[in-house]
Image (tube, rainbow, N blue to C red):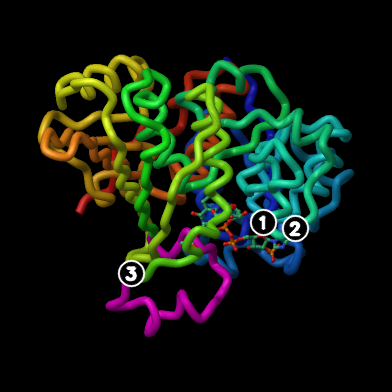
């Protein structure tokens, strides 16, 4: 029998952290031994999250590296940008395994990070050490490492939709346009005017146009896979729903390729990977079809008239876009089946 690993969650009172609690509670090889809060240590976590009543009886621990070391083997960081840059190196030096779901270690250049995130970057040594955990593409690199940087929510949906075609050279990378939409939980639990009910209900808006911090992350991966520098247009929209991301991607097809060709390419690329589902010809997915699950569903339509392909990729931002992919990465890191604790069906309706 596998000995359970002890897990701590920093940022356990945020949306990503609370989702990690939900997922890890049903993981057969993980015990949650510390739920951590920087602002309300000492308080029972169920006080603020009644859905955890009589399930999680722990009180919140402070952010204290020696305490975390005494209680855990692996730490999930579900903290705002700028926190992990300082904290992750201390945890690693203390001998812990770290999975960071913030953006602090995704970009290999500290300068690029500072430009887009407006925070001081982590030390180069740790930026180099972090393995980018886009599980279906870099799963082999994640195996056995101690430090994983979990991809962003929009990049997960977008890159899973693009990498097979870019890697195969089937689309012209210079023509890629990404039109992405997210539910409001993507912005975290903190209050803001944009996310206020009266502002977002019956509304639909583009935001951070040409300034979104996920642009360099998407470009970093596409450049690596294309073997040339790729720059893209990526526009994010806020949608009045709680969970879900849809990334609709347009690109010019190189050569003559049909819907069937794309289907075959993607089915082959994701063969044996349990969480990417390719839709049959003529079908594209909606966010409801992955709600509450770790799936990424992808559909295509090649347009012979324009010579472009439209790729539609959907995820649940809190699961596949954050906590679910972090658990998938833990599984890969530990050498367990990647679907351990994650093999559940989307909630419907
Ligand atoms: N929501 C999503 O869909 C996704 C989020 N992410 C990223 O994951 C991270 C967490 O996101 P999310 O859960 O939505 O954010 P939330 O704002 O909901 O939660 C973040 C939590 O971090 C804690 N925190 C704040 N400051 C500090 C600090 N200085 N030290 C330690 N903990 C701190 C807060 O809890 P407390 O005050 O109790 O310490 C807070 O509850 C962010 O970096 C986000 O960008 C990535 C992919 C998807
Ligand atoms: C809806 C919404 O506001 N989404 C957030 C996603 C933030 C996020 O996940 O940030 P990092 O991945 O950079 O940590 C945004 O667009 O900024």
Q: Which residues are magenta?
A: 183-204
Looking at the picture, does residue 135 appear above or below residue 310? above
| Residue where numbered disc 3 is placed | 240
Residue located 40% across and 41% down the image = 157
Residue located 50% across and 41% down the image = 231
Question: Does 119 sit left or right of 253 as displayed?
Answer: right
Asked if the residue at label 2 sits under 8 Å from ligand 2, the reply is: no
Q: Position of residue 125 (x, y in %)?
A: 83, 32
Question: Does 159 sit left or right of 248 as displayed?
Answer: right
Q: Secondary structure at mark 3?
A: loop
Asked whether 346 or 277 is in front, the reply is: 277
Q: CA distance from mark 2 to mark 1?
A: 5 Å
Q: Position of residue 67 (x, y in %)?
A: 85, 46
Q: How many marks?
A: 3
Residue located 80% across and 45% down the image = 122
Q: CA distance from mark 3 to mark 1?
A: 25 Å
Quadrant of the image containing the C terminus: bottom left
Q: Mark 2 touching mark 1, by CB under 8 A?
A: yes
Q: Secondary structure at mark 1?
A: helix
Q: Residues within 10 Å of mark 2 (few under 14, many from 20)?
A: some
| Residue where numbered disc 1 is placed | 117
Q: Position of residue 89 (x, y in %)?
A: 83, 39
Whether residue 7 appears in this view of the structure is no
| Residue where numbered disc 2 is placed | 119
Q: Secondary structure at mark 2?
A: loop
Pointer 2 or 3: first along the chain: 2
Question: Does 4 sit left or right of 218 as displayed?
Answer: right
Pointer 3 or 1: first along the chain: 1
Residue located 68% across and 52% down the image = 35
Q: Position of residue 79 (x, y in %)?
A: 67, 55
């Amino acid at each position: 029998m596998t000995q359970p690993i002890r897990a701590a969650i920093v940022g356990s009172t945020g949306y990503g952290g609370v989702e990690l609690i939900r997922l890890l509670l049903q993981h057969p090889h993980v015990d949650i031994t510390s739920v951590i809060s920087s602002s309300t240590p000492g308080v029972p976590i169920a006080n603020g999250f009644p859905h955890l009543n009589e399930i999680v009886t722990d009180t919140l621990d402070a952010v204290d590296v020696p305490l975390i070391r005494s209680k855990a083997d692996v730490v999930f960081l579900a903290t705002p940008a700028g926190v992990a840059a300082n904290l992750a190196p201390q945890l690693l030096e203390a001998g812990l395994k770290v999975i960071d779901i913030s953006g602090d270690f995704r970009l290999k250049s500290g300068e690029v990070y500072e430009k887009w995130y407006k925070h001081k970057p982590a030390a180069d040594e740790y930026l180099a050490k972090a393995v980018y955990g886009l599980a279906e593409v870099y799963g082999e690199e994640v195996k056995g490492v101690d430090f994983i940087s979990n991809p962003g929510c929009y990049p997960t949906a977008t890159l899973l939709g693009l990498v097979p075609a870019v890697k195969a050279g089937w689309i012209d990378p210079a023509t890629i346009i990404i039109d992405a939409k997210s539910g409001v939980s993507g912005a975290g639990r903190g209050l803001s005017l944009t996310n206020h009910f009266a502002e977002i209900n019956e509304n639909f808006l583009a935001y951070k146009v040409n300034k979104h911090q996920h642009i360099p992350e998407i470009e970093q991966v596409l450049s690596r896979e294309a073997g040339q520098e790729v720059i893209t247009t990526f526009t994010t929209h806020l949608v009045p729903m709680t969970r879900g991301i849809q990334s609709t991607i347009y690109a010019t097809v190189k050569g003559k390729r049909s819907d069937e060709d794309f289907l075959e390419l993607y089915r082959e690329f994701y063969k044996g990977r349990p969480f990417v589902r390719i839709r049959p010809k003529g079908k594209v997915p909606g966010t409801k079809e992955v709600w509450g699950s770790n799936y990424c569903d992808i559909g295509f339509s090649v347009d012979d008239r324009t010579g472009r392909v439209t790729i539609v990729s959907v995820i649940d931002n809190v699961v596949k876009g954050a906590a679910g992919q972090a658990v998938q990465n833990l599984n890969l890191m530990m050498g367990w089946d990647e679907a351990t604790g994650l093999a559940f069906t989307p909630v419907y309706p």
